[in-house]
Image (cartoon, rainbow, N blue to C red):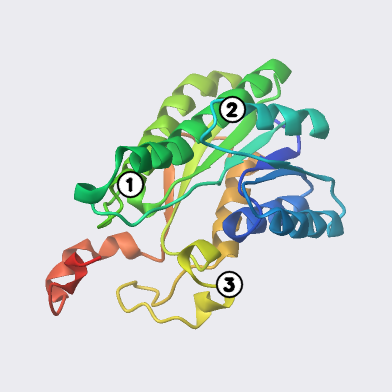
Amino acid sequence: MTVPTHDRLAIVTGADSGMGRATAQLLASDGYDVGITFHTDEAGAADTRAAVEQRGRRCYVARQDLTSPDTGDTVDHLAEQLGGLGVLVNNAGAGHRDRALDLTYARWREMLATDLDGPFLCAQRAARRMVETGRGGRIVNITSVHEHVPRLGAAAYCTAKAGLGMLTQCLALELARYDITVNAVAPGEIATPMTGMDEADAFREDRPGNPTGRPGHVDEIAAVVAFLASPRASYLTGRSIPVDGGLMLMAAHGHDMADGSWREL
C-alpha cells in the first residue's frame, strides 16, 4: 500500500493562544514547519512562534482578519514563506452571547463571516495549492459541539459552525480525488482564554453535567488535530469528531435538571 505523503508544512489560524497554540506546538514536535495567524494578540503569536522554534522548526507569523474578503491572501502569503503547504488547520473563530430576538444583523454577519466565510476562503486557497503540488494534503476545520447541538444565546455561532461542518463534508467529496482529506474536530468546553479559563482549569474545574466531570485541555484537542493531519489518517475524510468528554451523550438527562434557570442568559 502506498500512503500519500503531503508536505510537512502547516498553517494554523488563530494560533496566538489556546487550541491554536497547542496545535502549532504539537505539529512542530511532529516535524512540521508552521505558519500561524493572529487577529489582535501579536504578543501571543510571538510566544507561539518562540515555542515552535524551540522545537527546531521554522515559524512564520501573519495578522489575519477573517471577516475580510481578502483573508485567503494570508494563506498564500504564509505558504510562500513556508515553501509549500501540506496542512491547513482552520482554528480561528469567535463566539457571542445574544438572544436571537436581540441579535443585530451586523452581529449576525460578523459571526458568519468569522466562523464560516473566512474558513471557506482559507480552505479554498489551501486546497488550490495542494491540488497544484499533486502531493495531497490535510484540511482540519475546528467547529464545536454546537455544530451538532444548539446553545442558548448563540444562534449565529451555532449556525456558522453547523455550516462549517457541512462545508467539511462538501470539500471532502470534491477533494478526495486529489488525496486531500477534510475533517472537522468539534470541541466541547475547553479551558482557554475564550472560555474565561486557563489551561490548568481543565483539571480543577468541576463539571457535573459532563461524564468526565471537567472541561477539556487544549492538548486533548491538538492530539486529535495532529492525528488528522498525519499520513495515518489517510482513509478518514468528511467526518466531524466530537472531543467533548461525552457531553453530547447527556441529552436524555435533561429531565434531571432541578429548575428552569438554564433558560436565562
Q: Vertical placement of 55 versus 201: above or below?
A: above
| Image depth: mark 3 or mark 2 in front | 3
Q: Secondary structure at mark 2?
A: strand
Q: Quick check: 66 above or below 205? A: above
Q: Position of residue 231 (x, y in %)?
A: 66, 39
Disc on res. 199 = 3
Q: Give me the disc on residue 14.
A: none
Q: How far apart, in angstroms, are the residues tagged by discs 1 and 2? A: 26 Å
Residue density around tag 1, few if under 14, some if 14–19, many if 20 or more, within 10 Å: many
The one nearer the camera, 146 or 251, is 146
Image spot of residue 178 (x, y percent): 60, 20
Q: Residue at x 71, y 50 (%)?
A: 27
Q: Amino acid at mark 2?
A: Ile
- Choose top left, top right, bottom left or bottom right for residue 262: bottom left
Give residue 180's mark. Answer: 2
Q: Residue at x 31, y 52 (%)?
A: 154
Q: Which residue is mark 1?
A: 158
Amino acid on which disc 1 is placed: Cys
User: Of residues 21 and 239, which is closer to you in this image?
Assistant: 21
Whether residue 169 appears in this view of the structure is: yes
Please identify the quarter of the rendering in which residue 75 is found. Answer: top right
Examine the rendered structure and indicate whether residue 184 appears above or below residue 26.
above
Q: Earlier in the sequence, mark 1 or mark 2?
A: 1
